[in-house]
Image (cartoon, rainbow, N blue to C red):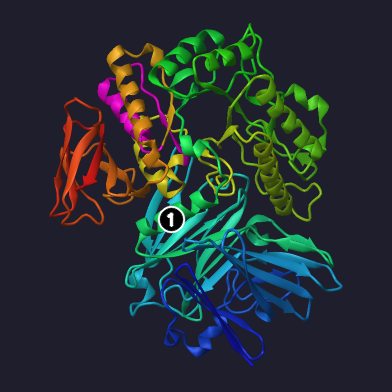
Amino acid sequence: MGKRIEISENGLSLVFDVTENRDVRLLNGGVLPFEEGRIEEKAEQGFRVLEVQLSGEDRDEYHGRSHRASYPGLRMKYARHYEERNETGLLFALEMNDPATGLETVSFYQFHDGLAVFKSWTELRNKGAEELGVEYVSSFSLNGLAKDGALDQDDKMKLHLAHNGWQSEVQWRSNTLPELGLAHMTDRSSKRVSLSNTGSWAAAEHLPMGLLENEEAGTTLFWQIEHNGSWHWELLNQFDHLSLLASGPSEHDHGWWKKLLPGESFVSVPVAVGFVRGGFEEGIGELTRYRRATRRPNTDNEKLRIIFNDYMNCLWGNPTMENLLPLIDAAADVGCEYFCIDCGWYSPGKWWDGVGEWLPSKERFPEGIKHVLDYIRGKGMIPGLWLEIEVMGINSPKLAETDDSWFFMRHGKRVKDRSRYQLDFRNPAVVAHADEVIRRLVEEYGVGYIKMDYNINAGVGTETDADSLGEGLLGHNRAYLEWIDRTFATYPELVIENCSSGGMRMDYAMLSRHSIQSTSDQEDYVKYAQIAASSPAALTPEQSAIWSYPLREGDDEEVVFNMVNALLLRVHQSGHLAELSAPRRELVREALDLYKSIRGDIREGLPFWPLGLPKVEDGWVSFGLRRGGKRYVAVWRIDAEESETALPVSGMIGKAADCRLLYPQGKPGGDCVWDGEAGALKVRLERIRTARLFEVTER
């Protein structure tokens, strides 16, 4: 006899039906109650809990390249379910089995107390007598995404995606499904809207996340694939309903295939899933709370110390004791709290293809690098160094101590990218090498901050000790995370910045561990404004490191623009501060003093976008943070002809408030007026390529 399983937790509802023949359907997920009449009886069979494809098994329906209608996914039968409470919240687990192959599956849903978010993943267990070849397994599956409301999905659903690229990170776009080619013309189709990443840069082209808004019902679904390698998600139609599948790597998308021997198990990559009443801002707000709740507890995200890094529009990878000392003095003078020496400290000249030993250059530091690092500490700052631990240059002297087992291999050859080899962290010798480098930097040199860069993409994977290239990559991805976890356990006060040519690995496998993320290598401060304003939708504001690099040849307004880029996020100060005029340097000091006074609000504030999500073509850009009755609003006039604009502030229509210019103080060129009736901040910036930071406080 069939039964119904209903989960109600933190305002979320999951409804499962188990039929008389033990088929399981996930009929509802979201913040709205389940309405029986929303799903036709014949369509219920398409509401799958999971999809799993084994080698040699059939496919069903008009699947095209999608992962729906898999076998034995369609054959799985209910075994049992259970619930337990842990320190995170409710854990719900649903077990199913396939009598034909002996495959058992467990679908996990880990809820988080106080949050409308759960983490979903799948475990496969081979309980049969024969080996199984796994080609695909979903981490999360949900059908019926557009069933709430009377309108067709073409008329009410909006998909929010974050495109990503080097120096062009976090480019949000919002589209209807027909605009993306998924018009609702049939009950099922070979067409899907899908995003995949292949390789070791998890955010090479897109961020591993998305938001799907039902504008008629006033609800939004969001998801975040928490993996630092290959991943995939797709939207498609099944039985005349809109469906989402999210997963890690698969065979036909990423060259991943896993041999599962009898008695063995496999766990898929986790996916965070949440639902809210409201649209994009409400979804990002809940995701921000979830990100804060689930990342590694650390003092860096509490204190938000200001970092100076000597690279961007400054030393450009050419540090020496001579050119560092004036910068150290200037950084300390304006109030920086970390000073990180960026790339080049380990080589007297050209170094790109020779990295791997990570020993300081005597030519650059004739008195030893520790002398300079001690000088930094003597100025009241914590010293840091740049590192790229996952690679070894093709001309590195360290290669003499290695063999092929250290590196990614394909077709019997070491994998090269940009004149570097990819180290394989499944190899204990590689881990021992990495451990020794970190030990030397921390214990011998006294480093408290590491900018951990990663400037290659290792591609589909490695054939060494792997069932497939993608399986080798997945094993390395997970081994690297284990190494990072052990490193933080050994050195809990060490800050390690996550950097991959800027934001190419902006994912929450990494960011649940790292307290800070380099958002971009963008060298143009005006172009950086849009990246900065968009970034709080990709990661928490306090993890979003934004370069501020006043230029030698700039003017006062250029300094202000640079500083406003970073003031509501995490300041990554750079530029030739020692060579700035006294008034321009004072503008830097003023901004950093202000930052120290508001950073307590930054680490708890939630983002909003008065003008909508920024685009590179916008003449005005704005974003803000709200905490309680206070809102901070950053505004940039890029190239708009008009000198005034109105910034609607959500939830403030008809409310009295005071507004004031926070930065820069006492400087003409920009001001504000609060329009309570419209609930809008009216601002004026006299010149193009200028910026200001305002504060709005409810009365």
Seen in the picture, residue 641 relative to 340 is either above or below; the reply is below
Q: Is residue 490 left or right of residue 279?
A: right
* 566 inside magenta stretch: yes
Residue 203 rendering spot, x and y as whole percentages: 53, 47
Assign the N terminus to one quadrant of the image: bottom right
* 691 inside magenta stretch: no
Q: Residue at x 59, y 74 (%)?
A: 49
Instruction: Tell me where residue 126 sits by quadrant.
Output: bottom right
Residue 588 rendering spot, x and y as whole percentages: 34, 22
Q: Residue at x 80, y 39 (%)?
A: 428
Most foreground residue, 338 or 203: 338
Instruction: Tell me where residue 25 sits by quadrant.
Output: bottom right
Residue where numbered disc 1 is placed: 161
Seen in the picture, residue 280 relative to 410 is either above or below; the reply is below
Residue 496 rendering spot, x and y as whole percentages: 58, 34
Most foreground residue, 661 or 670: 661
Most foreground residue, 523 or 220: 220
Q: Is residue 245 left or right of residue 617?
A: right
Q: Which residues are magenta?
A: 543-569
Residue 71 in view of the camera: no
Number of numbered discs present? Answer: 1
Q: Secondary structure at mark 1?
A: strand
Residue positioned most to the bottom: 1
Q: Is residue 327 left or right of residue 435?
A: left
Mark 1, residues whose alpha carbon is within 10 Å: few (<14), some, or many (≥20)? many
Q: Residue at x 60, y 52 (%)?
A: 227
Residue 524 in view of the camera: yes
Residue type of the residue flagged with mark 1: Leu
Residue 291 rendering spot, x and y as whole percentages: 50, 51
Seen in the picture, residue 74 relative to 614 is either above or below; the reply is below
Seen in the picture, residue 434 relative to 194 is either above or below; the reply is above
